[in-house]
Image (tube, rainbow, N blue to C red):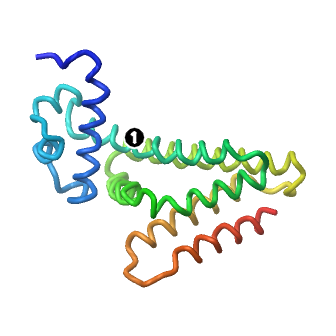
Amino acid sequence: MSPKIGMEPIRRQQIIEAAKHCIVTKGLPHFSIKDIAKAANLSTGVIYHYFENKDDLLVDVLKDSFSNTEKLVKETVDAASNYNNKMKAYLETVAKVPDENPDFYIILLNYLAQAPYNEELKRIISRFFQNLGRFIEGILQIGYKEGVIKKIEKGTAANLILSQAMGLAFYYLISNEKINKDKINRDFVEIFKKYIE
């Protein structure tokens, strides 16, 4: 039986959200298509109608997770009018992601653990990091053109910012320490603003 016309994007997203829930609650290697079907309140047959297998679905889950985060960052930065505001918007937005979308980093950590064993996941994650790096380089180029920052190695600066933001997010995710995230996030923004200027 074919799905109703117009339902495909809705059903696919429903299945992707159920798979995200399974990843966050059980961990990537510890759930089945049956678990996803139960979380989505669908039959396994419906899932197989939209996705060839679990790996096919997991690739789409990863792409969806990345696109949501990229969209949020891009919209925030694009709304800013000049280099200083764009860089501040970028740094503040990525510093807030662990609190505003903690599932993103849980999902990413699960996929990072599997990437050495799955070339497709490794390729997607690598492309995500490359896109983020180029995005940061674009912001830095604006600063250089506006005369706000001196000529710097954009690739190195972008990688430092990206790796520090990811490191903080993972630290927040697994740390049981009582930490002042607001202060750390403010310091993160200020340190990189000073470094780049």
State the residue in front, 189 or 115.
189
Residue 107: x, y in percent?
A: 35, 55
Secondary structure category for the residue under label 1: helix
Q: Residues within 10 Å of mark 1 (few under 14, many from 20)?
A: some
Q: Is residue 169 visible?
A: yes
> Where on the picture, by quarter, is residue 5?
top left
Question: At 37% across and 81% down in the image, what residue appears?
Answer: 176
Question: At 70% across and 66% down in the image, what residue appears?
Answer: 192
Q: Amino acid at mark 1?
A: Asp
Say which quadrant the C terminus sits in.
bottom right
Q: Taking 37 as reference, is 152 left or right?
A: right
Question: At 77% across and 55% down in the image, what residue appears?
Answer: 84
Residue 158: x, y in percent?
A: 66, 55
Q: Which residue is mark 1?
A: 64
Q: Taking 24 as reference, is 108 left or right?
A: right
Count of numbered tags: 1
Question: At 61% across and 47% down in the image, what residue appears?
Answer: 76
Q: Residue furthest bottom?
A: 178
Residue 15: x, y in percent?
A: 24, 38
Q: Is residue 116 visible?
A: no
> Where on the picture, by quarter, is residue 174?
bottom left
Residue 110: x, y in percent?
A: 33, 57
Say which quadrant the N terminus sits in.
top left
| Picture layout, residue 160 above or below residue 53 | below
